[in-house]
Image: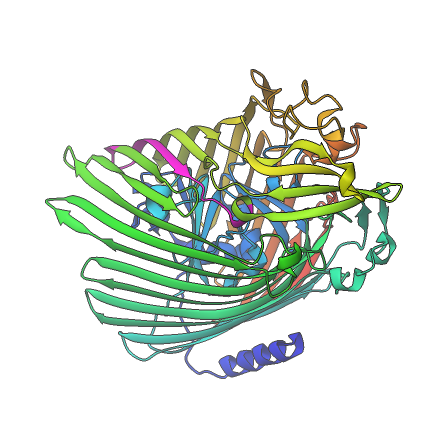
Amino acid sequence: MKLKQLTLGLAMTCSAGMGLAQQRDSTDLYSFSLEELMNIQIVSASKKAESLFDASLSASVLTREEIKHSGATSIMEALRLVPGVIVREISNGNYDIHVRGLDNVPPNSLILSSTNTTTLVMINNRPVYNYLQGGTFWESLPIDLNDVEKIEVVRGPSSTLYGPNAVSGVINIITTKLAKEGLTVRGGGQFGSMSTGIANASVGYKFNDKFDVTVSGNTQVRDRSNGLYWNNATGQWVDSPADLGVPNTDERYPDPDKSMKKYGVNAFVNYQANSNSHFSLATGLQDSKVQSIMFDNSVTNMSTTSTNSKYVDFQAQTYGLSTQVSYVTAVQAPVMGMQGSKYDYDVVDATAEYDINIHGLSVKPGVTYRTATYKDGAYWDVSNGGGTFGGTQTMNTFGGGLRLDYKFLQERMRFTGGVRMDKFTYPSKWFASYQAALSYKLNEKNIVRAVYSRAYRSPFIFDTFVSYSSVNPIGGGMYSQYAVTGNRNLELLHSDMMELGYRSMLRNNLSLDIEGYYTTTNNYSALIQDETSFTPENYPIVANTAMSIENIPMTVHQAGVSISLTAVISKVQIKPFITLQNTKLEDYSQYFSTSDAAPGINNNYDPAAYNVNSGIGTETNHKFTPKAYGGAQINYSISSKFNVNLNTYWFSKQTFYQLDNTLINDGKSGIEHINGKALVNAKVSYTPVKAISIFVTGKNLLNQKSIEYYKSDATPAMVLGGVSFDF
């Protein structure tokens, strides 16, 4: 679908909506009292609806109204409004997102190691995790802000709730439901700096209190803030990809001036058969191309990533039994134009849980099944070593667990917890995750909680099945070969957490939430160089170096505290939050080779002294996870027509270490010093009639143009203007 066609369609939808005689009433979050704000419902913390105040885990709810008033232009940017979440902009509209850190771990390795592979992102409980090498391709989400009712964030290991990969937390994006019978039309568009154009629209019809249908569409087009590329070969910035000296520049960078081009189309169907039976069906597709820094690219820092995907998701709740089945199929190229970097994938997720209530005790047994199949044979000659993982590879996951929820001591004390077992295709053994949370309500305005939990990350297709070789000239007509293989017996990364929390309504208009945590994370893996065999008789390839994915001895220790306040003063709401944390690496070595490897730049030419085990017994301060970060929202509802929102996001200085720091070792290459930064944003909106709002948004008003990520773009101040409607 072309941008002009979609924009025209959205404009027609807007015009039709304006002609409706009946305007839609909506509840304004900013008219809520503090007590009403604390009673906002959250489901993700225990898989049942409860007030945010009563949640037994560290959790936050970001509502549709908060997002709308803040001026956030995407789901990713909106997460800057949530405590305990690190959000760095890489290029206009593209972000690196972490819950509580664990970013750039291990340092001095591939850029991929910095991406977030330990947070489970979901849409209506449907995982959107990528099983090739972990993490989330945020630009490939088919929905956008117009589809979002709220975003629920649970901080800390949560695998007993949602299965593997909920190691550092869960981000669950909940889509909107129709509130009234008849036709509902909502959406809007905005345009601004760097040719940033964003449009969303949805049309829904609720036939009666049992059946409704909604169709939505969204698009974003954004320019980069600059057209520069870092040339890895020369260590210099160049003006365009044509200056990088690669033969397939047009394939690698089809739109060098764009940071993002994407669209998505979705359909949602809900049927409430009776008070005990509800069925929902969601389906959609998306197409995206972004320039960002997520995967390592031997040419430059910036890569073009493309994803075209389709999905279907069916959910049913019938008399205590909850079932969900989803299917996603996609064509994806993490680095367009790079050999081996294109594949198809198909992922099926299925879950079933049954809620049994016995005299106030909720017992919830459940089972899950996942199959993820990745195929690169359609794009590369895998029979001759092309591609990355040799054709078609499948990773299956079987899991089962039991959750308990019980209140006692006159319902002041509450225990929630459970255990879960998961078995993968490789390694073929069971892994146990568990969680125990105890909360005590001192009175109606004060609650304390304690949590202990363990969660595992699933194996990846790349780590398990990777199989490729690279031949490099060494002079005199001779070549060396690197052969990379996966590992089917890796110990899986897991995290253990101890946490204490306290929530209080200090006064009728002031609340406090404190969470202190300590986590230990083990079993990281990396690409390790092993021994080199020299075979002159195989001329012209005279040296063969073995490389494989292996566990490294490093352990990550993280201690921190997050503090959040909410104040309601007449028509003003104030929400400041801050996280202070310290991250240490135990037994860490920057040298990813064995003691048997040939001397080289990977081991400082002395593998016996500089290898993957040479850091045992040491402790290192990790410098990329910021020691302090946070933000605030201040919203002032001047009247029913005018609203002003000021919000900030900030973080302390950090240092990113990439593989070149070890390979080149000149004190400059592979090192990026990120300055501390405070972003100030504001949105002013005017509602001339109840269903239509006109607004102006200012981003980065202090015009802090420092970069936030390794060799990334620095986004300057931006101004956007637009209109939204809700009939």
Point 60% across, 56% down: residue: 683
- 651 lies left or right of 117: right
Determine the residue located farthest toward the front in the rendered image: 537
Furthest residue in direction right, as rendered = 476
> Taking 40 as reference, is 225 left or right?
right
Give the magenta part as a residue range: 440-462
The x and y percentages for residue 564 are 46, 37
Which quadrant of the figure has residue 312? bottom left
**Residue placed most toward the observer, 87 or 662:** 662
Considering the image in quadrants, where does the N terminus appear?
Answer: bottom right
Q: Is residue 314 left or right of residue 552?
A: left
Asked which quadrant contains residue 667, the reply is top right
Colour scheme of the picture: rainbow
Is 676 rendered above or below residue 151? above
Q: Closest to the observer: 574 or 319?
A: 319
As for residue 295 lying within the magenta part, the answer is no
Q: Position of residue 267 (x, y in %)?
A: 44, 73
User: Does residue 352 appear in the picture of this structure?
Assistant: yes
Which residue does the image show at 26% across and 58% down from the upper left? Answer: 322
Q: How many marks?
A: 0
Residue 628 screen position, x and y as percent: 57, 31
Residue 708 seen by the camera: no
> Can you say whether 327 is above or below 660 in the image?
below
The C terminus: image quadrant = bottom left
Residue 519: x percent and y percent? 45, 29
Residue at screen point 42% across, 37% down: 156
Is 277 in front, or is 313? 313
Q: Is residue 398 above or below residue 392?
A: above
- The answer to which quarter of the image holds residue 602 is top right
Residue extending furthest left?
A: 359
Q: Main secondary structure of the magenta part?
A: strand
